[in-house]
DNA sequence: TGACATAGTGTGTATTGGACACTATTGTGT
DNA sequence: ACACAATAGTGTCCAATACACACTATGTCA
């Protein structure tokens, strides 16, 4: 069995489901396709994997090229390999998902590409290829992951209020949480550091701001620790 | 951006971590490589993906060809794509894991290939390529998955005793469980059907045998149900 | 019939999860 | 200055779950 070219090579792509959180909504970054197939349709950012880069590298490169994003939380999701998912030829896609702090940039500036846009997940249009399946898988993964790992903080700015955090969890988990129980639980882990600052937004009581204690979390993680919500 | 052959194609393989449970131990199926690279080394069963088959199809075909296994529980695990994981050229591998009822076949007959062998996970030799990483990932996945989904039953024969079930969970989770609490919990789901038969093995009290109620489980699963252990 | 080996069984306690409603603090408008 | 609007912040009780824990039962075999 010779080991080269016995089997036709597959074109290998990475696609990224990029989640952001803004205005109390979970959003996803989509790109309008400039080329056939699916020209003019919305799609997930992604592209071909080069021979000299890992899958993770490819995903990060595409995020930077297509959306101007770097240093984001990125994880492999699932590999989509049905035979006809690309009408051109056999293309296998290693899907990833990323979490970005959308409020840091503003919604417009988060990407400088004119053909990129943040969509609330409830208003995502029909997508090219099987990207709707990929998005669904990413949402399911996010939802299950957020329950036992503090990845929600990747979606918030470095300083945030407990209300923001709760709204984020509510958006991701798609159900409402009790304020008192929520605060009790997240504070009990001791991973939120209260800051001197408060958030003053309009005519109501200002909210205490917190930051997430990444260092402490890394230590706890090594000893097998679960951040459940 | 032309969409063909701008980027070199990668060779695409599937590799399978096949778990079995026998003699109170969790085991994994390994194949002795007949060809270079890593000739004579042990490796996970797997091979190249054909252009006209899905990833899942490819994994099942390899399981049948290399180990004579069919109709097993099979799930995609993770895709390994570091640049130099194969010394020949760029090869990306979509890893899967499978659970088989090892006791149904016996350890020898479970595969007719002379170059295949079941290894207890504690005694796995050095593996070819990055297969040690793949195995580690599969073990981690099995361990977390078994906690909230009743996949353990895939590893047992259709009829089993509660002790067998408990030993399986202990092997997978790598810790001991209290017999009374374990029985209380698994029976509370009402998914184990007691059979008329008992298991008579040697000089001690015979054990009640059960089967797993797949139909009832499928119904419960649709309503969002968790089988926690 | 006694020794051996594994099967099988219940209770009490500590912890956690979840329901639940009011007070506090700021800005604004009159 | 006072009322109002809007969000922040706080504690208790009850139910369910998790966990620790030890003895009896039933078969085989010598």
Image: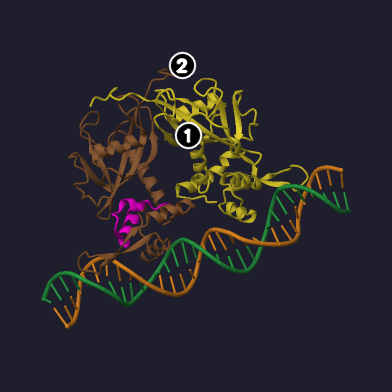
Chain colours: A brown, B yellow, C green, D orange
Instruction: Kindly identify which numbered label has been placed on residue A93.
Output: none
Q: CA distance from mark 1 to mark 2?
A: 24 Å
**At 35% from the left edge and 52% from the top edge, which residue is drawn?**
A152
Quarter of the rendering containing residue A227: bottom left
Q: Is residue C23 left or right of residue A36?
A: right
Q: Is residue B165 left or right of residue A76?
A: right
Which residue is under mark 1? B96
**At 63% from the left edge and 31% from the top edge, which residue is drawn?**
B105
Secondary structure beneath dot 2 equals loop
Confirm whether circles 1 and 2 share one chain. Answer: no
Which residue is under mark 2? A2
B32 up-or-down from A224: above or below: above
Q: Nearer the viewer, mark 1 or mark 2?
A: 2
The residue segment tinted magenta is A148-172
Quadrant in which the N terminus of chain B appears: top left
Q: Is residue A158 left or right of residue A229?
A: left
Residue C12 placement (x, y as % from top left): 63, 69
Residue A204 placement (x, y as % from top left): 23, 69
A65 up-or-down from B217: above or below: above
Secondary structure beneath dot 1 equals strand
Q: Is residue B172 visible?
A: yes
Which secondary structure class fits the magenta region best? helix
* B89 magenta-colored: no
* A150 magenta-colored: yes
User: Label 2 is found on which chain of the structure?
Assistant: A
Taking depth in this image into account, of A186 and A84 the one nearest to the observer is A186
């Amino acid at each position: 069995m010779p080991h080269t070219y016995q089997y036709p090579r597959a074109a290998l792509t990475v696609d990224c489901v990029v989640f952001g959180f803004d205005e109390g909504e979970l959003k996803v970054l989509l790109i309008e396709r400039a080329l056939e197939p699916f020209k003019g349709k919305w799609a997930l950012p992604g592209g071909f994997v080069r021979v000299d880069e890992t899958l993770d590298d490819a995903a990060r490169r595409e995020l930077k090229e297509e959306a101007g994003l770097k240093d984001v939380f990125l994880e492999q999701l699932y590999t989509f390999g049905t035979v006809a998912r690309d009408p051109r030829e056999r293309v296998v896609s290693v899907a990833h998902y990323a979490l970005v702090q959308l409020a840091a940039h503003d919604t417009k500036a988060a990407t400088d590409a004119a053909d990129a846009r943040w969509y609330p997940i409830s208003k995502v249009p029909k997508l090219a290829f099987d990207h709707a399946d990929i998005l669904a898988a990413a949402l399911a993964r996010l939802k299950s992951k957020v329950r036992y790992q503090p990845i929600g903080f990747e979606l918030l700015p470095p300083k945030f209020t407990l209300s923001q955090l709760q709204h984020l969890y509510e958006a991701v988990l798609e159900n409402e949480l009790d304020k008192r129980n929520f605060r009790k639980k997240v504070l009990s882990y001791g991973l939120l550091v209260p800051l001197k600052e408060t958030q003053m937004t309009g005519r109501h009581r200002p909210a205490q701001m917190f930051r997430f204690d990444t260092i402490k979390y890394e230590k706890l993680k090594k000893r097998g620790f679960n951040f459940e919500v």
